[in-house]
Amino acid sequence: MNTRRALRQALVALVVLNLLLSFGNAWPTLWPRPEARLSIDLAAVVLGLSLLSLHGPLRRATVVWTSAVLATCVLLHYLNVTVPAVLGRRLDLYWDGQHAWEVLKMGAASPSAMKFVGVAVIVALAIAALYRLIRRGVATLAESLQSPRLRTGLVAASTAVLGAGLLAPQGLPALQHAFAPSVGTLVAEQARLLHRAHDASDDEHLLGASPAFDGTLGALAGADVVIVFAEAYGTVTLDNPDLSSDLAASRQRLADAIDASGRRVLSARLISPTFGGGSWLAHAELLSGLDMRDPNDYRLLLKTQRPTLVSHFAAHGYRTVGWMPGIQRPWPEGRFYGFDRIADADGIGYRGPLFGYWRIPDQASMAQLQAQELGPQRDDARRPRLVVFPTVSTHAPFRPLAPYVTDWTAVLGADAYDSPDAVAARQVPASWDDPVPAYLSAVRYQFEWLAGWLSAHAPADAVVIVVGDHQPMGTVTGPDADWDVPMHVITGNAVLLDRLAALGFQPGLEPDRPALGRMASITSRLVEIFAGE
């Protein structure tokens, strides 16, 4: 092969392979977007092939294995650029991978399940085609490397690209954008995270000191306390002008319902330990008062007997209830909290039709909670309740979404959602590529059922805490969103309201920046606020 032809073939192969290892994400979709960047991973592979070719033509096995490695690199690169764009946070293959099957089931549970299966088949075929394309490129490159002059040039070029790419993060930020995120760096980071997860010490002192869960609950005067962890309810609903405007009317109706019920609402911003998922980290952080940003700390916490708000309330005579409609499988972690009752998806009493993967509409869950735990007339035998209720209707993929039912008793029976509107709602497919409209509908629904419950059903003296567990996924928030979530405390207790205001909580449902602090920091303050004089 003459040098000129070898050069042309090598350039075509390198351009194609580089495009496969340097694309970005076409936010807010799952699709890749071509970018004019260089791949240092490809430079390393080319350098290695060039040096191997010094000993003669590359073997077929070398071409096969190199193609397999590069195909794997392309898939890892896709995850590396897509997961942060979709979730809004970095990829952790160990922890995120444990929930991958549930995410797949989420997609399969939608009315478009057959479409989901079709997509899976297309993905499998695409991976096979990807491998064939890469193998063709590697084989062409291997053939071109038989030209000594071209081989010398590729050694020099790949060494220069590799050296510049490795040096750029060390002090050349202007040059850094010229290089695609490195798969090698990703693999090293994931190996570090995996090692930490498996070899993390069980030394309880790594968690730091727990808040002092002392004092009484005198300021509550025996009132029920309901902590609603509002799934994926983040401050993007306040800070994004388009989202805030769309939600303004339903948010105002909730505010009006609170006022009409004789209560007031004070709000603040908190910094969640997680983003786009991992709700249990936020639940654990608020309930324990410990930093849960590292999933390893969460795992360690469950092995301890650390006090929590749940144990604190139980020690003062409260019946503690974990109202968990999102739990659809055994939940041994629940033993850590020590709830008097844990009601999962099969245990809350819902008998109506299923709405997608998450099955139970939040209004129906709250109606069952009201009927079983909050509604019975208060007397000497009726202990006050602490309820922890993580919602699900605002969980991705946000559809199908049940319609709001004005007659709350109607959602208690098997015919809860037999209306034509409800039947049609169950057939609405999820949209992973354009989730914002569905997210807005879900948040409006959340405001609506909260308003309905507070207006006519909630115990008159109840203290209701509504707190977002984390921001929604990155395809809703956009890039570079903060990790802030709203917290609303709804009560008619003047003592609590005064103490919250002194802490920095603001009137209404739209707290201004900045955040009061991390979610863990508010736990001890709540203990103080709930205490008697």
Image (cartoon, helix red, strand yellow):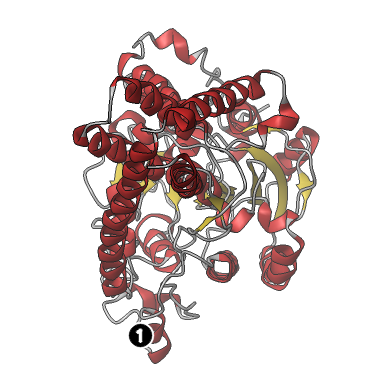
Which quarter of the rendering shows the C terminus? top right
* Res 252 seen here: no
Image-based side of 475 in relation to 245, left or right: left
Of helix, strand and loop, which one carries label 1? helix
Residue 28 drawn at (x, y percent): 57, 59
Q: Amino acid at mark 1?
A: Val
**Residue depicted at x 26% and y 55%:** 128
Residue 329 drawn at (x, y percent): 23, 48
* Res 520 seen here: yes
Image-based side of 360 in relation to 88, left or right: left
Camera-nearest residue between 197 and 313: 197
Which quarter of the rendering shows the N terminus? top left
* Residue positioned most to the front: 2
Camera-nearest residue between 371 and 80: 80
Q: How many marks?
A: 1
In the figure, 406 relative to 258: above or below? Answer: below
**Residue depicted at x 45% and y 43%:** 10
Which residue, given by chain and number where applicable, does mark 1 sit on?
423
In the figure, 34 relative to 413: above or below? Answer: above
Q: Crowding near pointer 1: few (<14 within 10 Å), some, many (20+)?
A: some
Residue 31 drawn at (x, y percent): 49, 59
Image-based side of 459 in relation to 6, left or right: right
Which quadrant would residue 111 be assigned to in this image?
Answer: bottom left
Camera-nearest residue between 4 and 344: 4
Residue 134 drawn at (x, y percent): 35, 47
In the figure, 326 relative to 271: above or below? Answer: below
